[in-house]
Image (cartoon, rainbow, N blue to C red):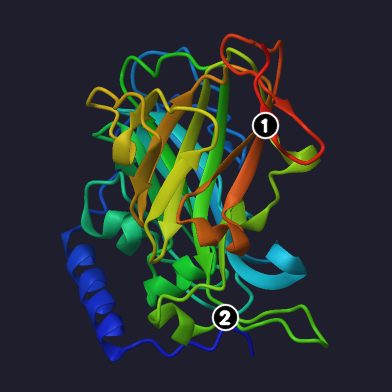
Amino acid sequence: MRHIIRPSQFAFAAFAALVVTAAAAFSTGRVRVQASTQPEAMAFAPNVPAASARRGPMVVHVDLESTQTEIALPGGARYKAWTFNNHAPGPFIRTRVGDTLEVTITNSDPTGMPHNLDFHAVSGPGGGGPVTTVVAGGHATARFKLLYPGLFVYHCGAAPVMVHLANGMYGLLLVEPEEGLPPADREYYVMQSEFYTTAPTDGSNVVEYSHQDGLDENPRYIVFNGGTPMINDAALTANVGERVRIYFGNAGPNKISSFHVVGSVMDRVYREGDLISAPARALQTTLVPAGGAAVVEFVPQVPGQYAFLDHAIFRLEKGAMGMLKVEGVAKADVYQGQTTALGEHMSHH
């Protein structure tokens, strides 16, 4: 059987206490909100839902389904991930501060494993976990008032939480400020995560979950967007002079990310998803903690291929890299040079 899990008894006890305490505090009375809803609030990586021109709070309804889906990891490995809506990462959800997030979760996991939702943007016990926990074949609906703007991680918080995170159950929730975000020409969703697995064998490329490697914090794969390639024909795209905004999340479950765009200075960085404070300016690399996020913006000045990566640089070999292909007119006053056949660099005169 896949995914043999032996978490500590402490993890089970702590989660059980959280559920009991939160359930006792939760009121089952009906929540009165506006009847109107916001459609098309979700998209899958690397896409982002379009910004809305609306003003004022609304009910934003989303449907999330816990499933198991085979995904491809670097080197041709195949892995049975635990997913939301058959994707790892799960969908990007776009809202505004003051909105009510109405979420229906359905458990279609064939193993019978319970699942739930812990939204880092939700104010209340477990981030919503105790009132969204569902067993196989079940479903639950809950509503949460979004009180703070920011870019937030969500994930399955059912016990043992570390195993659900390590297996692919996470995504990003954007809560825009009341006035919305400044316009950007391109918006992308990129999420880093770790997979702890056995090694592929000569007879099979199927890999299995390794709980011991998780405890040792020794991931075999550290990937962007669940290992989905973002290079060559699948590279992200932009034009010279366009403002590119990347909503970057780090699901972890263990490692800090050192996010960096090679060949471009990030001229606006909303550190740790903070959309209240003024952004940091002109950063080369930004730290994104496990369970955290950042909004980074830059404007490519010349055409070419731009790598974005975790600058803990050996992680390139584990999969933590993507590419942005930029087209447009070259600017000799910004970037010029000539490369010989031997790779030597000479300046134009």
Q: Nearer the viewer, residue 157 or 104?
A: 157
**Secondary structure at numbered mark 2:** loop
Q: CA distance from mark 2 to mark 1?
A: 46 Å
Q: Dot 2 corresponds to which residue?
A: 209
236 displayed left or right of 35: right
Question: Are the residues flagged by discs 2 and 1 in contact, CB closer than 8 Å?
Answer: no
**Which residue is located at x 73 percent, y 67 percent?**
75
**Which residue is located at x 63 percent, y 82 percent?**
208
**Which residue is located at x 25 percent, y 48 percent?**
29
Quarter holding the N terminus is bottom right
**Which residue is located at x 50 percent, y 53 percent?**
192
Let me know if residue 306 appears in the view. yes
Q: Amino acid at mark 1?
A: His
x and y, in percent, of residue 218 in the image: 46, 76
Label 2, residues with CA under 10 Å away: few <14, some 14-19, many ≥20: many
103 displayed left or right of 326: left
x and y, in percent, of residue 272 in the image: 31, 41
Q: Amino acid at mark 2?
A: Tyr
Q: Dot 1 corresponds to which residue?
A: 345
